[in-house]
Amino acid sequence: MDLLITFFSAVLLLIALIVYSTSRRKRVYNSSSGIKSLLKPADTSLIDLLHQRAIPNQRLIHAFGITNTFVSGDLKVHRDFLTKAKLIIAELSSKGEGWRMLGQTVDGAIARLLPAHETHYAAFIQCLTLRIILVALFKADPDSLDAEGLCIVTDMISRRWAYSKNTDRTALDQDNSLNGANACLGRWIPDRDSYPNPLDFIIPAYETMWRVVAVTVAHVCCHGDDNLLDIVLRFSEHPTEDQFQFFKEEGMEPSMKMIMMETFRLHPPTKRISRVRATLGWKGFFMPTLEVADIQAVHQSAQYGDNPAKFDPMRFHPSRGLEQPELFPFGYGKLSCPAALWAPIGGALIVAKVVQQLKGGKYELIAGPRIGDRGGWDEWEVINGSARSMKQSPSC
């Protein structure tokens, strides 16, 4: 009898240990030092880092069918992705001919998508960003990019991204928008040998860039600070590296770079970065299965000066005399975003060109109750000035 009791006790303990070890236990890092230790751990190989990143991103395979380094622990996949990404970025360098062509691409995309009457602001920025990516990165023919097709792709990404967050995959399995989006991309992208799965590059570029552009334009247009507006418009006229970094110490004005830094601080493109460490042996029972770098919590802490919830590019101005802590908008360590140096000025170019149209011509931005993120852009609209009299909401 005692032996039987001992046996069943051992079985129950084993079941408890299995449940405990396989349940999703989470540890959140909300300090700069904690984020660094998670994203750049000591004595960890690159392949281990890739696996730690890939495991929590598996939902994206089911959502989008992507096969890139964000969902794979394969070294070759990682190196191939980095090589191609760096070549694309080099072509769009702010010091080369590609930069001038990018400016033309942005101008052309805005001209094609500005509404005859009115359009939802977030949808406008989403389609604009996707169009720019398709033309600049994939060499798509601008004349082939129909507005309806762009909306099909952007709506698919928004919908399936939201569905992928749910543990219940029913909605994701029942949604067939991915097929329609891939059909559009198949028509638009000529080089399928180089890009057999375009979403491998579209998702990481588009998903962050459109939100950065949307919130920056909203802040600049609706902040009520003419200095910010002038800085952005000057950069639109002269989109150079020098103009991007220029600021007036005596005039107490921030630079275009500081404006973008404040966007990345207040609205980090990736708010939380997850890692799963595969720990074998008895230690695995006591370590969390999911570890999260809470980028947003760190960026909105008091270490960035007074009123960290306020959009204030001047917090980066030398006159404040603050020793600014690091920002983590593009991650940290070996797996940080390969476009980290280019994205601020690339995003600034799109922001400046959009602001130029919304504040210097016949188009206006109608503000909603709050600045959104992936969602939350209710009542935000871009309208043709001729339709202004029909709108009751204030324009920025």
Image (spheres, rainbow, N blue to C red):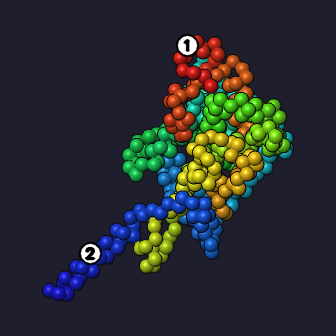
Residue pointed to by mark 1: 390
Is 125 located above or below residue 387 in the figure?
A: below
Q: Can you give x and y, in whole percent of width and height, for residue 90 in the image?
A: 79, 49
Q: Is residue 3 visible?
A: yes
Q: Residue at x 46, y 77 (%)?
A: 283
**How many other residues sit within 10 Å of disc 1, few (<14), some (14-19) or many (≥20)?**
few
Mark 2–mark 1 Cα distance, whole angstroms, equals 69 Å
Is 180 located above or below residue 331 in the figure?
A: above
Residue pointed to by mark 2: 12
Q: In which quarter of the image is residue 92?
A: top right
Along the line of sight, the residue nearer the viewer: 265 or 86 = 265
Q: Can you give x and y, in whole percent of width and height, for residue 371 in the image?
A: 55, 35
Q: In which quarter of the image is the N terminus?
A: bottom left
- Type of the residue with mark 2: Leu
Which label's residue is closer to the chain start, 2 or 1?
A: 2
Q: Residue at x 57, y 27 (%)?
A: 367
Q: Determine the secondary structure under disc 1.
A: helix
Q: Can you give x and y, in whole percent of width and height, for residue 347 in the image?
A: 70, 41
Q: In which quarter of the image is residue 354?
A: top right
Q: Quadrant of the C terminus?
A: top right
Along the line of sight, the residue nearer the viewer: 187 or 136 = 136
Of badges 2 and 1, the one in the foreground is: 1
Circle number at residue 79 = none
Q: Can residue 270 be seen in this view?
A: no
User: Which residue is outermost to the left?
Assistant: 1
66 left or right of 283? Answer: right
Along the line of sight, the residue nearer the viewer: 45 or 147 = 45
